[in-house]
Image: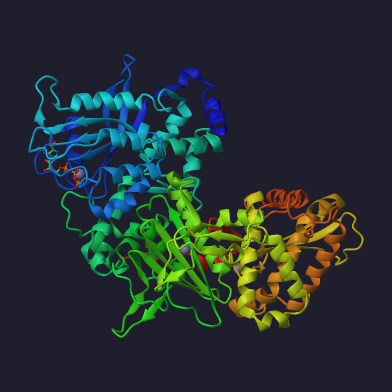
């Protein structure tokens, strides 16, 4: 809807309008099937025998122009993306699939449908783009060589329905005297035009401001700019924020730029020269030495890979771009930075064979630890799931010194072994269409949650086509001859059966009737409210009790903090969540209009602390009584949260900064005062009285207005967030943290400013 308004506003001046007839044309298929040659035949560029293999993606802006099938004098224009078909590209290429595109999926009859992986490509498209993708399946070489394979059209049609536009045959090297094109090309052109004319962007109106913004952006020399700079250009041409975003999305879909505005990690970058990015990634993926080194790519080798590469007629990239390129590789899940900051690890090239691991799921856990087993069951397993998961969990990667004197990282083509400093260990492994996840800890629920959310975020954002086609399950615990049973129980279903009064649930494989409560051990659904109350009670009884079982309580506290922070984020995303509030005269009792001090907190996990850089994160202001009353319910919740995290966070923060930035006693005192004072202002009691209404992701209405009032205040006081002293950092669990400068820098990957 907003997009529509933006669009209508842009049309105020009809005589300045240009009508858009453009789309992206994407050529996919295995290596050597004839994509580059076909594109040449389509664009009249003299196809030849012995075409060189394509590195990365070749992008040809306005490569093809075809007459509109129904409208005289109108040409449809296509930006062509020719994907290199080598196996190493399988994972990264899907990243560059987009909507509003005509896909040409090529295969070669001499090699066969199977060998050309036609179905795999269709599946990949459906996973990434969804059923709306439009594919023309083209077989090449139809006049040369012997045909050995036919394609089962009815079956493909049945399984992929409207995605498949039609099947065609071409020979890109043989002239067709009737049409003057190569054989089959004229028919293909017609089909491309027929397909593209139905796209919703066709005939869209662009006013001059949009057009000029687009042209100015495309003329820039930089391969990439920040979204802020992109916006600045559009603003100069009079585009609103919404219009700017619509333009960015449109340019992405039409194949001019790469921009992922919905992705927290990517939304700041606009890649203006996608070919630059895809080719550079291509050189890295094709590099033999990196493959031989199990994916390790030291910065000192970048010049060899990106500049002195062996490919003739391909661009060579200068070192000044490397730091930025490394950052993008990480954001696009191709690689992660090594801890010492001297290189990257390209996760596609980790070893084939599983290394020996500290423990295996088949073995019993250590006596003082518990293990949770969970399986993510998918209708199909998306290509790249494991390499991308390796990048996203790399902060937990387990490294081990081995006899050969080398550091070994415990990841392999099918899985990874992880260690989370204080919250246990985990083993993830892909077995067919199931991703198995085992965590082991004193209290493994937290690490399980972190990994499950990371996985879910990865799947939901990367493969929308998998929506509703995967679920999380408990594996059947029965073992026969040390073989685990294949039974799976969907967690959501078990919860429902339990709620409906069932006690046991039978496994269809081993036919054992399992106790549902036992199966759900580790997956109990305790709302963050219930967790908060439980922890409050514990903390109130004194820190000693927590100390007795520190490992468990650390994980419990981390778990509920993650839950409550997410619940808050669901209500309002554009401001920090933690703060303390106090009257400047220290007296909460007489609540008249008076001056208050608001102090923001850094949200670093297990190390929350007050912003302590001078002049940042503190606001002193006069506030009317009503404002305090409005904020009170949220402030009360925050004071309760802070009180429970502080016993662990204060020592951690003081240790982290190497000095006492917070005094336990003073802070506790001011928090108590804040909690009591705001508590008396509450109109409704929201302890755990109404569990139904206070379900997980939901704040009470009053808390929500309090949060919004807080953010409104910060926006008014500090519109450009200059005095916050906090920066927002997205997390792989799909949330984000507002971090102080020190924590923020520590969380960034170590990439040098210059690489020679
Ligand atoms: N006879 C004949 N040869 C073709 C046809 N299409 C491609 N070729 C030849 O097949 C070889 C591979 O063609 P390319 O166009 O490079 O294949 P590609 O799919 O782009 O390969 P990658 O870039 O490696 O993925 C070249 O030598 C072409 O000349 C065709 O329709 N008929
Ligand atoms: Zn090619
Ligand atoms: Zn069973
Ligand atoms: Zn911090």
Q: Is residue 134 something that shows in the picture?
A: no
Question: Image quadrant of residue 191?
Answer: top left
Q: Position of residue 517 (x, y in %)?
A: 61, 64
Question: Image quadrant of residue 9?
Answer: top right
Q: How is the image coloured?
A: rainbow
Q: Is residue 69 something that shows in the picture?
A: yes
The one nearer the camera, 224 or 176, is 176
139 relative position to 268: left or right: left
219 relative position to 42: left or right: right
User: In the current view of this chain or complex, which residue is farthest to the front?
Assistant: 511
Q: Position of residue 524 (x, y in %)?
A: 62, 63
The one nearer the camera, 186 or 357, is 357
Quadrant, the N terminus: top right
Q: Position of residue 130 (x, y in %)?
A: 41, 40
Looking at the image, how many numbered discs can be counted on the residues?
0
415 relative position to 673: left or right: left
The one nearer the camera, 267 or 755, is 267
Residue 247 to residue 737: above or below = above
Quadrant, the C terminus: bottom left
User: In the current view of this chain or complex, which residue is farthest to the left?
Assistant: 145
Q: Position of residue 269 (x, y in %)?
A: 44, 49
User: In the current view of this chain or complex, which residue is farthest to the right?
Assistant: 590
Dividing the image into four equal quarters, which quarter contains ligand 1? Answer: top left
């Amino acid at each position: 809807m907003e997009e529509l308004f933006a669009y209508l506003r842009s049309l105020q001046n009809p005589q300045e309008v240009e009508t858009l007839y453009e789309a992206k044309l994407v050529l996919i298929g295995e290596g050597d099937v004839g994509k580059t040659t076909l594109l040449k035949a389509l664009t009249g560029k003299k196809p030849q025998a012995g075409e060189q293999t394509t590195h990365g993606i070749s992008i040809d802006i306005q490569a093809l122009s075809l007459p509109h099938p129904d409208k005289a004098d109108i040409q449809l224009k296509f930006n062509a993306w020719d994907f290199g078909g080598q196996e190493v590209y399988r994972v990264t290429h899907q990243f560059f699939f987009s909507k509003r595109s005509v896909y040409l999926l090529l295969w070669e009859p001499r090699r066969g449908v199977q060998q050309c992986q036609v179905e795999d490509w269709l599946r990949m498209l459906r996973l990434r783009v969804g059923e709306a993708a439009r594919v023309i399946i083209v077989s090449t070489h139809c006049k040369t060589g012997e045909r050995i394979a036919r394609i089962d059209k009815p079956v493909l049609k049945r399984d992929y329905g409207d995605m498949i536009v039609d099947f065609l045959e071409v020979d890109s090297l043989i002239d067709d005297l009737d049409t003057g094109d190569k054989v089959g090309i004229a028919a293909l052109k017609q089909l491309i035009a027929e397909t593209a004319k139905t796209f919703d962007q066709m005939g869209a109106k662009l006013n001059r401001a949009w057009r000029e913004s687009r042209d100015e952006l495309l003329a820039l020399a930089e391969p990439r700019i920040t979204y802020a700079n992109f916006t600045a250009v559009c603003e100069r041409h009079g585009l609103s924020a919404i219009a700017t975003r619509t333009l960015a999305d449109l340019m992405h879909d039409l194949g001019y730029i790469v921009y992922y505005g919905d992705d927290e990690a990517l939304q700041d970058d606009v890649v203006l020269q996608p070919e630059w990015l895809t080719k550079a990634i291509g050189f890295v993926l094709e590099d033999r030495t990196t493959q031989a080194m199990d994916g390790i790519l030291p910065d000192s080798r970048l010049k060899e890979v990106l500049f002195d590469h062996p490919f003739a007629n391909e661009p060579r990239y200068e070192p000044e771009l490397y730091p930025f390129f490394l950052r993008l590789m990480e954001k696009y899940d191709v690689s992660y930075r090594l801890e010492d900051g001297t290189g990257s690890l390209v996760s596609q090239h980790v070893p084939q064979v599983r290394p020996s691991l500290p423990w295996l799921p088949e073995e019993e856990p250590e006596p003082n630890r518990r293990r949770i087993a969970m399986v993510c069951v998918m209708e199909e397993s998306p290509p790249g799931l494991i390499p991308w998961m390796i990048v996203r969990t790399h902060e937990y990667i387990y490294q081990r010194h081995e006899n050969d004197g080398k550091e070994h990282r415990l990841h392999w083509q099918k899985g990874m072994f992880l260690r989370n400093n204080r919250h246990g260990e985990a083993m993830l492994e892909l077995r067919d269409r199931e991703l198995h996840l085992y965590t082991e800890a004193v209290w493994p629920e937290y690490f399980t949650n972190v990994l499950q959310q990371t996985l879910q975020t990865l799947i939901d954002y990367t493969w929308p086509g998998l929506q509703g086609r995967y679920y999380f399950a408990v594996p059947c615990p029965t073992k026969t001859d040390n073989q685990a049973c294949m039974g799976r129980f969907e967690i959501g279903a078990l919860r429902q059966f339990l709620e409906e009064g069932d006690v046991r649930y039978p496994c269809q494989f081993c036919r054992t009737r399992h106790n549902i409560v036992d199966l759900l051990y580790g997956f109990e659904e305790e709302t963050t409210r219930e967790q908060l109350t439980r922890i409050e009670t514990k903390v109130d009884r004194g820190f000693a009790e927590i100390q007795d079982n520190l490992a468990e309580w650390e994980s419990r506290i981390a778990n509920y903090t993650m839950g409550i922070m997410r619940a808050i984020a669901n209500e309002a995303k554009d401001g920090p969540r933690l703060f303390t509030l106090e009257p400047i005269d220290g007296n909460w009792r007489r609540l008249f209009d008076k001056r208050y001090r608001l102090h923001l907190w850094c949200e670093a996990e297990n190390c929350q602390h007050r912003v302590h850089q001078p002049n940042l994160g503190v606001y002193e202001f006069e506030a009317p009584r009503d404002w305090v009353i409005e904020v009170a319910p949220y402030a009360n919740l925050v004071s309760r949260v802070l009180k429970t995290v502080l016993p662990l966070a204060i020592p951690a923060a003081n240790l982290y900064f190497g000095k006492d930035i917070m005094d336990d006693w003073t802070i506790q005192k001011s928090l108590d005062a804040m909690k009591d004072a705001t508590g008396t202002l509450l109109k409704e009691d929201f302890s755990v009285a109404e569990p139904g209404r206070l379900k997980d992701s939901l704040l009470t209405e009053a808390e929500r207005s309090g949060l919004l009032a807080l953010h409104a205040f910060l926006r008014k006081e500090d519109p450009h967030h200059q005095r916050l002293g906090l920066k927002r950092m997205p997390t792989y669990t799909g949330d984000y943290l507002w971090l102080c400068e020190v924590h923020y820098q520590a969380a960034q990957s170590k990439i040098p400013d210059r690489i020679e």
